[in-house]
């Protein structure tokens, strides 16, 4: 079932990241996502929001928006910020287990069906996950 | 309202147990690291008990990777306990941490339905 779109403004605090996680989970659940696909969506959207809050500050003030757009066949989230962006190489594999850093973007790509980055006065990250047919 | 999260550090240099529950992420993972860094450098065995954790992010993965590598450098293995059917186990498997640490999953009943699997 398709539900309403959600627009959330995030600031750099724990309460906003909680809202990001909670609203993403609620929206994905309503669309019929469950199990690993649900975890994938929550994890990927959280990483995108955390990245935006960490790297998306413009003159010290982060302005980050999360837009969740349900479709009949897919979950779509767009995270935008006003910062200078960050490096987002294509097809970088998940680092080895012993590696300390660099998992955020590779995990987003692993968890979602489509991940697109666009730099236009800030960074825009679009995340898409398709509903699988049951049975 | 913020999801509850808690981190307890127990034990001694023989056996250290770091318990993390709720949602563990970049906003609270430093507390996890405070106990984990010291334990991984000196304790005979280190257990990270995430059975009551419902979410971990890459900041937590970063700390677990550091501790796991430190333990391997001491010819020991970090042990991580998780709940079945929860996000932490799914993420740990996805990043391939089984090669770096011992991950033991078991069924856990969560009292808060909001924390349960979808």
Image (tube, rainbow, N blue to C red):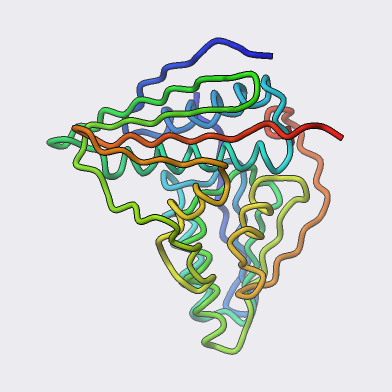
**Residue B84: x %, y % from top left:** 78, 50
What is the quadrant of residue A49 in the picture? top left
- Residue closer to the observer: A126 or B10: A126
Tell whether B6 sits left or right of A48: right
- Residue closer to the observer: A4 or B22: A4
Tell whether A107 sits left or right of B112: left
Residue shown at the point (69%, 14%) measured from the top left: A1
Q: In the rendered image, which quarter contains the C terminus of chain B?
A: top right
Residue shown at the point (71%, 51%) measured from the top left: B51
**Residue A91: x %, y % from top left:** 45, 58
What is the quadrant of residue B55 in the picture? top right
Q: Residue furthest right?
A: A135
Q: Residue furthest bottom?
A: B75
| Above or below A12: residue B33 | below
Residue shown at the point (64%, 19%) measured from the top left: A72
Q: Residue furthest left?
A: A59
């Amino acid at each position: 079932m398709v539900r309403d779109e959600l627009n959330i403004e995030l600031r750099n605090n724990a309460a906003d990241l909680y809202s990001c996680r909670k609203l993403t989970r609620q929206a994905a659940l309503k669309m019929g996502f469950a199990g690993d696909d649900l975890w994938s969506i929550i994890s990927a959207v959280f990483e995108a929001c955390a990245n935006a809050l960490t790297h998306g500050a413009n003159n010290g003030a982060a302005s980050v928006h999360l837009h969740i757009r349900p479709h009949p066949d897919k979950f779509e989230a767009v995270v935008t910020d006003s910062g200078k962006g960050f490096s987002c190489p294509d097809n970088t594999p998940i680092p080895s287990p012993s590696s300390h850093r660099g998992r955020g973007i590779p995990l987003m790509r692993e968890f979602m069906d489509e991940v697109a980055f666009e730099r236009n006065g800030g960074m825009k990250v679009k995340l898409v996950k398709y509903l699988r047919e049951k049975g | 309202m913020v999801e509850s999260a808690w981190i307890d550090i127990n034990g001694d240099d023989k056996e250290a147990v770091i318990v993390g529950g709720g949602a563990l992420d970049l906003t609270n993972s430093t507390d996890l690291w405070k106990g984990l860094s010291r334990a991984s450098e000196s304790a005979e065995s280190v257990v990270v008990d995430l059975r009551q954790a419902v979410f971990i992010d890459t900041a937590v993965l970063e700390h677990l990777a550091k501790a796991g590598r430190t333990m391997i450098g001491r010819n020991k293995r970090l042990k991580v306990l998780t709940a079945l059917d929860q996000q932490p186990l799914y993420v740990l498997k996805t990043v391939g941490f089984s090669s770096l640490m011992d991950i033991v999953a078991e069924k856990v009943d969560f009292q808060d339905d909001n924390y349960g699997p979808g």
